[in-house]
Image (spheres, helix red, strand yellow):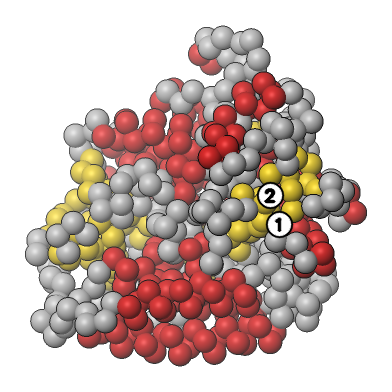
């Protein structure tokens, strides 16, 4: 076992973690970046649609702010919305300066800042404001940022390292200020747990949609940062708001194959198996309604008609137009036997985005001193009860810049030293004797979360889920305490925590709002209140006492 010391420890290598590393590197800080698999293999890589930003003269900040509030069902924090929306043009320009190649309007040639970029329109937006790189924006952003980060001498990248737990003053029996001093992480390649100390720790571990049986997310989305922060005494907010993307390709072998909202933005129509459109009967914006409404409409029509899926049809558009705008989606569909230029493609909703998370301010600061959270693992108040399409990558970029500024300024003023950090203790554990227990528990969690804590909920279903997770937590805690950790066990432990937090938040909310719809309380209350869970070991000195009120 070994101990690694740096100025800043970033846990997670998506758009939030990479952009943060790039900005902090300019402050001449020594940075360690942990990635649980290959650096780019996270949700950011698979983001298709784009990044929402006011870049057109016919658009304005107030319209983007309003659209975000409407999608968020009146639960968004206005300060968070305005900061992110108003910071969007600067963030886009920063990406362009880094070399991100966004799609240009037809016939335009790239000429730097004055280039004419193509803007698409997605659900919930009143204007065309989504700048994109064909249908693979996440890949373009992620790989471009990765290339820059890998060239930095003061950033150490450690791939295939999964964080286990944060190292706090409470863990060290040092109660001066309740601070975070680093984390323990497993080197998956050699199954060794090492200690990583830092004067600032940032969680950019992404969301938690792998808690569900069907998801558009990669296998890395197990809520690690949220679970670690909760265990360390940080508050968690609004976990009941799980966004289900309306259109995931329906095929037994198409694992999490997302069909971008931009397909509907460019004229794609949702239809029943008989070819009949149905969205105009559910919302005035039809196919371009907010995601929660579209997902519930599809779920309703599937259950009403007994269908395995509905269909998304853009075959009425010119084939060249479809292939030019959606080359990767078209290729993916073709791989499974569907030609989207000639026929409708079967789609179903799937868990897609975690709107809640670790409670933070607009600089990424959590309840625990020296601990920050950015990106999908955080809850800044931007998304409210439902995320507006293409606001996610935007939040990563804007809040990462604010967090970097705060970290750099704090570390420049305070040359605080680290206490001696203990090594990971494996003296009382043995190798697992039955690994099948882990896979069985993992499967059970994902199935009952899908069945009982899905798109449509009831008190009875949620109580069943609560009973199930309570029993599983006992098994997992006992297993974790007796056997050496491995990647699957660490993720199972975190998923169980995510499931428990999501269920408790859902049971607490006695209304239907945004992504949380329950048959027992189908109406929305006249007032909006956040669901904030406080752990028993709450650190108690939050930098955000009124949370952007």
Relative side of 446 to 159, left or right: right
Q: Position of residue 298 (x, y in %)?
A: 76, 58
Taking the view exactly as shown, the residue that stands out farthest to the front is 337
Which quadrant holds residue 146? top left
Question: 131 or 41, which lies in front?
Answer: 41
Helix, strand or loop at mark 2: strand
Residue tagged by mark 1? 309
What quarter of the picture does the C terminus occupy?
A: bottom right
Q: Is residue 207 above or below residue 103?
A: below
Crowd tier of the residue under label 2, counting other residues whose Cα lies within 10 Å: few below 14, some 14–19, many 20 or above: many
Crowd tier of the residue under label 1, counting other residues whose Cα lies within 10 Å: few below 14, some 14–19, many 20 or above: many
Q: Name the N-terminal-most of marks 2 and 1.
A: 1
Question: 333 or 7, which lies in front?
Answer: 333
| Residue name at image x 55 percent, y 57 percent | 252
Please say if the residues under marks 2 and 1 sit with CB atoms less than 8 Å apart. yes
Which quadrant holds residue 436? bottom left
Relative side of 251 to 476, left or right: right
| Residue name at image x 71 percent, y 71 percent | 456
| Residue name at image x 59 percent, y 53 percent | 251
Question: 193 or 508, which lies in front?
Answer: 193
Residue tagged by mark 2? 346
Q: Is residue 300 above or below residue 493?
A: above
Which quadrant holds residue 63? top right
Helix, strand or loop at mark 1: loop
Residue 543 visible in rendering: no
Q: Is residue 152 above or below residue 180?
A: above
């Amino acid at each position: 076992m070994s101990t690694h010391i740096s100025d800043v420890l970033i846990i997670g290598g998506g758009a939030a973690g990479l952009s943060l590393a790039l900005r902090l590197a300019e402050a001449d800080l020594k940075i360690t970046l942990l990635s649980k698999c290959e650096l780019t293999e996270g949700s950011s890589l698979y983001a298709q649609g784009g990044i929402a930003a006011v870049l057109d003269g016919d658009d304005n900040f107030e319209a983007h702010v309003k659209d975000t509030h409407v999608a968020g069902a009146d639960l968004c924090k206005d300060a968070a919305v305005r900061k992110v929306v108003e910071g969007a043009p600067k963030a886009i320009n920063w990406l362009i300066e880094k070399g991100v190649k966004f799609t240009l309007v037809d016939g335009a040639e790239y000429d730097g800042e004055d280039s004419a970029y193509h803007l698409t329109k997605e659900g919930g937006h009143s204007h065309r404001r989504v700048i994109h790189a064909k249908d693979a924006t996440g890949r373009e952003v992620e790989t471009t940022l990765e290339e820059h980060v890998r060239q930095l001498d003061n950033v150490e990248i450690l791939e295939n390292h999964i964080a286990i737990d944060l190292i706090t003053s409470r863990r060290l029996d040092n109660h001066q200020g309740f601070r975070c001093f680093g984390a323990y992480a497993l080197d998956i390649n050699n199954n060794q747990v090492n200690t990583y100390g830092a004067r600032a720790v940032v969680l950019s571990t992404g969301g938690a949609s792998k808690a569900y049986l069907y998801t558009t997310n990669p296998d890395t989305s197990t809520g690690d940062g949220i679970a670690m922060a909760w265990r360390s005494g940080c508050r968690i907010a609004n976990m009941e708001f799980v966004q289900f993307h309306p259109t995931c390709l329906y095929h037994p072998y198409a694992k999490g194959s997302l069909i971008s909202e931009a397909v509907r933005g460019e004229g794609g129509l949702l239809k029943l198996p008989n070819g009949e459109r149905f969205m105009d009967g559910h919302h005035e914006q039809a196919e371009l309604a907010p995601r929660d409404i579209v997902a519930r409409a599809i779920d309703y029509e599937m259950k009403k008609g007994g269908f395995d899926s509905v269909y998304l049809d853009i075959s009425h558009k010119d084939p060249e137009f479809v292939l030019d705008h959606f080359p990767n989606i078209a290729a993916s569909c073709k791989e499974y036997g569907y030609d989207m230029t000639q026929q409708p493609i079967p789609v179903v909703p799937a868990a897609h985005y975690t709107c809640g998370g670790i409670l933070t301010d607009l600089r990424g600061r959590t309840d625990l001193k020296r601990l920050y959270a950015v990106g999908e693992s955080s809850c800044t108040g931007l998304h409210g009860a439902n995320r507006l399409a293409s606001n996610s990558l935007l939040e990563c970029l804007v809040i990462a810049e604010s967090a970097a500024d705060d970290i750099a300024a704090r570390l420049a003023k305070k040359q605080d030293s680290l206490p001696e950090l203990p090594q990971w203790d494996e003296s009382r554990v043995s190798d697992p004797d039955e690994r099948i227990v882990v896979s069985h528990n993992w499967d059970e969690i994902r199935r009952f979360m899908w069945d009982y804590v899905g798109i449509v909920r009831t008190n009875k279903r949620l109580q069943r889920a609560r009973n199930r997770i309570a029993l599983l937590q006992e098994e997992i805690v006992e297993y974790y305490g007796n056997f050496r950790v491995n990647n699957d066990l660490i993720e199972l432990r975190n998923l169980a925590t995510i499931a428990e937090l999501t269920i408790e938040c859902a049971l607490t909310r006695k209304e239907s709002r945004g992504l949380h719809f329950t048959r027992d309380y189908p109406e929305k209350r006249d007032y909006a209140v956040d669901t904030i869970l406080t752990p028993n070991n709450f650190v108690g000195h939050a930098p955000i006492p009124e949370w952007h009120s």
